Image (cartoon, helix red, strand yellow):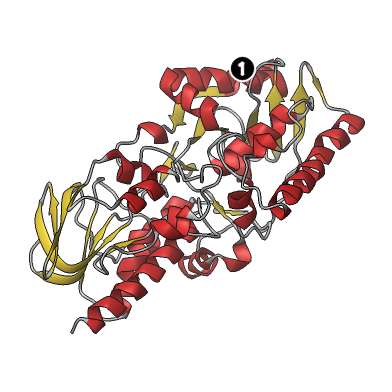
Amino acid sequence: MSGDVDVVIVGAGSAGLSAAKEAARKGLSYVVVEASHRIGGRAYTEELAPGQPFDLGCHWMHSASLNPFVAIADQYGFAYRKHSTWDSRTWHRGAWLNEEQRDALNSLSDDDEAVIAKAIASGQDTSIADVVDLESPWRPYHAYWFSLSTSVDIDQTGVLDINAYNDTDENWPVIKGYGALVAAWASDVPVTLNSPVDRIRLKSDGVEVVTKSGTVTGRTVLVTVSTNILSSGAIAFEPGLPDWKQAAALELPLGTHNRIAIMLKDMPAGDTEGQRATVMLEDDEIPMTIEVGPYGLSHAVAVTGGRFGSWLERQGQQASVDYLSERILTAFGNDMARHLADRVIVTAWQGDPWTLGSYSAALPGSHQQRAVLGRPIENRIFFAGEATSTDFYSTCHGAYLSGIRAVNEVAEAVHSAT
């Protein structure tokens, strides 16, 4: 890795990859360096078994009518499911909810929207927990679902950040894997893998990026690493990052959203398709949403988020498998025990050394930091990634769009300097 390129792109997740493609389209020279052994970042698909894809990270094409990956999926022949509603039941303390209970559970969403809107109208960027009814018997379910969509708990992010997200209520899952889609789309992007960046030096005539694989120089650098990596000090900046940039990273921390999959044996594909439930066994526990046989595949999937997701990750893989298994048997019957195979995948994004979390959530009072995080330093160090998006944060397509935005800024800087 040598030579003065127009831009050194740090990170080969969705933001870095879209930036590379946009740089090529604009005729900018570039180098992409990636710390991991693979591309895609938090978009990653593995197989539980041949023909059994499983997304460890992003899985849903959110706000699909505005999501550029829908057209990319069409181009590369990746099927997706065009609906956002699922038949789902709730197992509550030993029984399925009846119709009256379901209505009460669902009505809490309307109540939450009303009090959040009132807080926003009054100009308060307070936490969600400060305004919603915490005493509702249905709060644990909504708090759990909230932790899945934001990766944090209801006291850890504010009403303005939640309100700013551009949600069209179109969440389309990629059947063969969102990570696989990203990998196919970006297969033509040259990336230097296994090259974590040690330091980025700002020089009088450009930048110098020092990696484990060598040093590359450029006119500019585009940093697409997660906020937790940025604030951890894993990459040294010379001179150091200004206080305002450090504050932005610290106030947009990544939370935890993990996915657990168990292979199902001796069960014909499709026999359990569409069986979905949120299960809570005791009053004091965190619920868990389970889907058995999604899209006719032979596995069961569950998700965890927030502090509980972080705690369960730290207990190790088997603890997650046991937690899910117990709830599968409760909700779908003890006969399911003979179908639970040893083949499992359990994600651990908090412990991933190249991300240190799942996706960003603004601390209460900190939504404005997303725009701040995206601001360049001295028109030579640029920033992209889902956390810099002001309306599609926490998503793969938000990262994608941020990469294009940042390269447009890079192009303007490079051209104005020549």
> Image point 61% across, 30% down: which residue?
267
Up the image or down, 391 lies above or below 344; here it is below
Point out the image quarter for the C terminus.
bottom left
Most foreground residue, 124 or 66: 124
Q: Position of residue 396 (x, y in %)?
A: 47, 55
- Comparing 276 with 202, the one in front is 202
Please rate how many residues cluster around mark 1, counting C-alpha atoms within 10 Å: few if below 14, some from 14 to 19, many from 20.
few
Direction from residue 72 to residue 206 in the image, left or right: left
Residue 201 location in percent, x, y?
A: 14, 56
Residue closest to the eye, 407 or 314: 407
Residue 98 left/right relative to 222? right
- Above or below for 28 versus 108: below
Residue that carries the numbered disc 1 in the rendered image: 326
Q: Is residue 186 visible?
A: no
Side of 289 where 308 appears, left or right:
left
Q: Residue at the spot x=77%, y=25% of the render?
A: 135
Q: Quadrant of residue 272?
A: top right
Q: Vertically, is 403 above or below 108?
A: below
Q: Which amino acid does the dot numbered 1 rest on?
A: Glu
